Amino acid sequence: MQNRNSTAARRASGRRHPLASVALILIGLLTTGGAYALLSTTASAESSSDSSAAITEGQKLFAANCATCHGVNAAGTAEGPSLYGVGSASVDFQMGTGRMPLAFQGPQGAQKPPQFTQTQIDAVAAYIASLAPGPAVPDEKWLDGSGDAAAGLELFRINCAMCHNIAGAGGALTEGKYAPALQGVEAKYIYEAMVTGPQNMPVFSDLNLTPQDKANIISYLKFQQENASGVGGVDLGGLGPVAEGLFIWIFGLGAIVGVTIWITARPN
Amino acid sequence: MTTAESTATKSGVKAAGGSKFTSAAASYLDERTAISGITKELGRKIFPDHWTFMLGEVAIYSLIAILLSGTFLTLFFDPTMTEVHYDGSYVPFKGVEMSAAYSSTLNISFDIRGGLLMRQVHHWAALLFVAAIGLHMLRVFFNGAFRKPRELNWVIGFVLFILAMGEGFTGYSLPDDLLSGNGLRIIDGMVKGIPLVGTWVSYLLFGGEFPGGVIVPRLYSLHILLLPAILVAALGLHLLLMVINKHTQYGGPGRTNDNVVGVPVMPNFAAKAGGFFFVVFGVIVLISTFFTINPIWNYGPYDPAPISAGTQPDWYIGFLDGALRLVPPGWEVVLWNHTYSFNILAPMIIIGIFILLVLLYPFIEIWVTGDKREHHIADRPRNAPVRTAIGAAGVSFYAVLWAAGGSDVIATHFHLTIEAVTHTLQALLILAPIIAFWITKRVCISLQKKDREVALHGYESGRMVRLPGGQYHEVHQPLDDYERWRLVDYHDYKPLMIRPGADGKIKFSQRLRAVVSRWFFEDRISPATPKELEQGGHH
């Protein structure tokens, strides 16, 4: 009785339900958000289907972010090399791992969080690939880690370990350059690095290491990271004797000296 | 006994039966071996209670862990270089050609129950063994505990240190993986760098051109037979001399050159030490359980062609590797069609001199001081400023070489160029010992001055008193006799005076000795004398 009376009173006064405005905002947001999502997916679908649009988009991105060093036509300047013939694999590697755009001019561009979305990187890659032929982004079938790990280890030992360390922990090169650690690097980027030879790394062309060889190396690294690094416990960075020596001095001997002090301490 | 009998309960009777058996067994043994004399001597050996006196024990306990785990490993390790095709459970090596040594090490790691743990116990304990020896040696050095009558024991201890390094290196080379093969290649290079005989010695060692097929079995017989036998024998001698010479102790009231204040071995200390053995063993096993060491499956079988970035020896060989890395380029001379590699010879000679100086230091100091008395009270490092400073210089020299052994890891992890790291360390190799010497000597002398002041005038109490005349004055808290003793009880050496011998001449050696003695003792703070203390009390 009481309840019905109060509803009647509200209707009579013409007031809205207190949650009505919240609901209205929600509906509005959903509509605009949905429309935006719909539109943007169509836009990206368009760019992948229509490569000339991607190239135009890539050229714009290139002019805004890369041309300072690589030149307006990607022909290179004193600050950065020409990008003719580096291919989409190179762009995908350099921008996908955040090495490009450079944080600063130095011996080597360091890996950092990427500044562009994959769509944008693909656009720039399409633009660069349109300038001159070069190595393309690798096919998925080489990247799934199903190759021959034993053959991969042999190839890795002979071709890669002298710079990247046998456990892929990285190593020092001259004049502040270095071979980065390979732990946790995506298969795609390992392949692209081999085929394009970024920064201080040599190129391992398909004549040198066939795509199957590259797939084997990737399979070995994947196996090593997933199965072998934690076998004996924490791997201390895979750095070998330097890390082990520091560990035994600081933590091993440290713990034991602590015990000696405790044992000989006089009770107060 | 009579009271025990009168109050004998059932359990008391049992205990009496037990002690009867013990005493019967003891006298049975004693009548046949005269062991009671030894037991009495050993059981009543006094150990002063201070943590720094337990570092040598840590080394012994790690050695026991090494011997036990090593015995386990010998049961499964195949020390030959026969070519085999791997057939174990580690996938990337299926069918790969490798030596039987490497294959059996992989089997120990992956296919033998507890094998990986034992390998890691063996390796971690080895690292701890050498580290504990190093720390123990530093303790002995900075305490002057190598002085008469312990000079010979210092030499034996140092030989043990070298043997431990030899054991470490031979063991490191046995698995025949890429890392150990690279290490052997460096040794091969060093041997070949010796003029005239180098190449021949290398061929003799490796049974032909490196790597050959005999080096692993040869190193194996050194590693498990010859070196451990010498090591254990030398260790026995080391301990025997420790018992004969008695233990050093830190100075203090009631502690003189003629006594040792502490606890006897039996029963408490033995129980403590036994417990401590299990603690050390436990720490080693815990580390081995949770932390990988030498993951040889990552390195692959040895092959002279590939080499890995970041190839280093174990820490105790690191200073030798560092010495090689610090040689400037171009130190090779061609004379009469022979290449003389001073890039290898110079580090070998410098390290050789360094090792010889450490080995002979007790005799050098005796020669300088001319002190032939026995010393059983450990010096406080500050009371022997020049010795402490020499020690600091030696430590920094070693530390720079050691750091150089990991120069590439320093470069990558601190984002430096490897050239900058190398050049800095080259400069530091010469400068750091000089700087360390000077700073340490100054710090020691300052501490001595402070000690002297505190002994004479007491501590600053922080309590300000205003005198009737308006003058302010801080009250100094005098020390009690026990504390003061610690500060003034040390020997004050004076520089040697040159005096002509019986023939009225001054020999050259005498002059040299005077120069070195002056360098040792010209800056010195003599302890407060009783007379000064008396005057100081009137302040």
Image (cartoon, coloured by chain):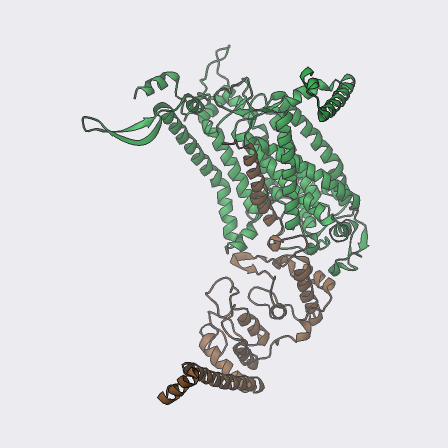
Q: Which image quadrant is residue B4 in?
A: top right
Q: Residue sitting at 72 percent across and 38 percent down?
A: B67
Left or right of residue B299: residue A258: left
Residue B346 vs A44, above or below: the answer is above
- Would you say A261 lies left or right of B495 here? right
Find the residue positioned furthest to the front.
A1
Among the chains pictured, the one given green colouring is B
Q: Is residue B331 visible?
A: no
- The quadrant holding residue A20 is bottom left
- Is A92 left, or right, of B35 in this rendering? left
Residue B296 or residue B329, whichever sits in front: B296
Is residue B55 or residue A203 the one in the foreground? B55
Q: Is residue B325 above or below residue A198?
A: above
Q: Which chain is brown?
A: A
Residue B97 point in image, percent of width and height: 78, 56
Q: Nearer the viewer, residue B95 or B328?
A: B95
In x, y percent, where is residue B14?
Answer: 74, 25
Which residue: 52% across, 35% down? B394
Residue B27 in the image, given as x and y percentages of width and height: 76, 18
